Each structure stands twice: as C-alpha cells, then as structure tokens.
Image (cartoon, helix red, strand yellow):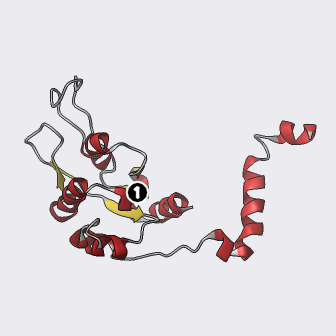
Amino acid sequence: GKEVIAKCIHELSPRSKFPFVAINCSAIPENLLETELFGHAKGAFTGAIADKKGLIASAHQGTLFLDEIGELAPTTQAKLLRVLQERKITPVGSTRPIDVDIRVITATHVNLERAMKEGKFREDLYYRLHVMPISIPALRERRADIRPLVSHFLKLYQGEHLEILKKT
C-alpha cells in the first residue's frame, strides 16, 4: 500500500506529467544500490561498458519513491543527503555533476527515531526527509477498509481472471 499512496500523491500533483520512479532499497545489494541510484560513467568499474542513467536522474521533475529507506547503508545515506541539499548527483566514476529536480517520498518499517539513537540512521537525513509524515496503520487496524479493498480488487481483476472464476 505504501507505493500505491506514493503514486497517488504523484498523480495528484503538478509533477504527474513526469516520471514516477520507485525503488525498494532493501531489495538491491548495497554494492549495486549506488550505481542504481546515481548511475555510472563508462569505464567506472569492470563491466561498465557504457554510461548508465541512475534512477534519481530518471525521476527528474517527477517523484522518486524510496521504499525501505531505513535499510540504506550510512555511505548511501550521506550521498542521498547531499542530493537533497545540493540538487545534484554525480554518477559513479564521473566528475560532472548533473542537476536534478525531484520530489522524494520515502517509506520504511524501521523506527527511524530509534535507528538514529542507535547510530544506524543519519539525523540530518531524517530531518531533511521528515517534512510531511504520513502514518498508515496496518490493515488489521482499519477493518472498515477491507470490504472496499476486496471490492476494488475483484473489479480490477475480474476481466483477467474471469475464465478461472467460471471454472471454480
């Protein structure tokens, strides 16, 4: 549901004509996440046979949704903070900064206040991101939402799965 809400915010905003780019920070190994986010220059490392545009640049003028931001490594947190402050990225292996204009929406299951106290999440990044917090209670705490959600998904998928439903 977090990505659905982020996409809804994007679609209802003036940035809706521009890309919505989502990435799950915990699904990509730390050593690959930097090039996924920032891109890389040809020759930056073995196997970098061409320039690669990163996800941050791909979201230019749109929205970047970072799911599970609480899982970011400290070095990546520092680089993300710099992007938010400077509005520029430098691809891995490049010396040329690229201007970026993005809205960042983040989500996590990690208690970031606790992570800050434990030294696992940067306090300055937290306050840069914590501009307009939205708390979404678990579905078990919103039982009244279950029926409308079931109805929505039945309507959404009935055409695709009509044959399966007829057989059962």
- How many marks overall? 1
Instruction: Please determine whether, in this image, residue 25 is positioned above or below residue 48.
Output: below
Where residue 121 appears, as percent x and y from the top left, is 28, 66
Which residue is found at the position 87% from the left and 42% from the top?
165
Where residue 75 appears, as percent x and y from the top left, is 20, 54
Q: Is residue 160 left or right of residue 135?
A: right
Report the residue that reaches farthest toward the front.
118
Q: Is residue 128 left or right of residue 95?
A: right
Q: Nearer the viewer, residue 84 or 79?
A: 79
Would you name the residue on which mark 1 appears?
65
Q: Nearer the viewer, residue 82 or 14?
A: 82
Mark 1 neighbour density, 10 Å: few (under 14) some (14–19) many (20 or more)? many
Q: Quadrant of residue 166?
A: top right
Which residue is found at the position 29% from the left and 65% from the top?
120
Where residue 86 appears, as percent x and y from the top left, is 15, 61
Q: Nearer the viewer, residue 161 or 122?
A: 122
Instruction: Please determine whether, in this image, residue 97 is positioned above or below residue 147.
Output: above
Report helix, strand or loop for mark 1. strand
Which residue is found at the position 38% from the left and 51% from the top?
25
Query: What amino acid is labelled 1 in the image?
Result: Phe
Q: Quadrant of residue 159?
A: top right
Q: Quadrant of the C terminus?
A: top right
Instruction: Please determine whether, in this image, residue 20 is positioned above or below residue 112.
Output: above
Where residue 102 appears, as percent x and y from the top left, is 30, 58
Q: Quadrant of the N terminus?
A: bottom right
Which residue is found at the position 70% from the left and 72% from the top?
145
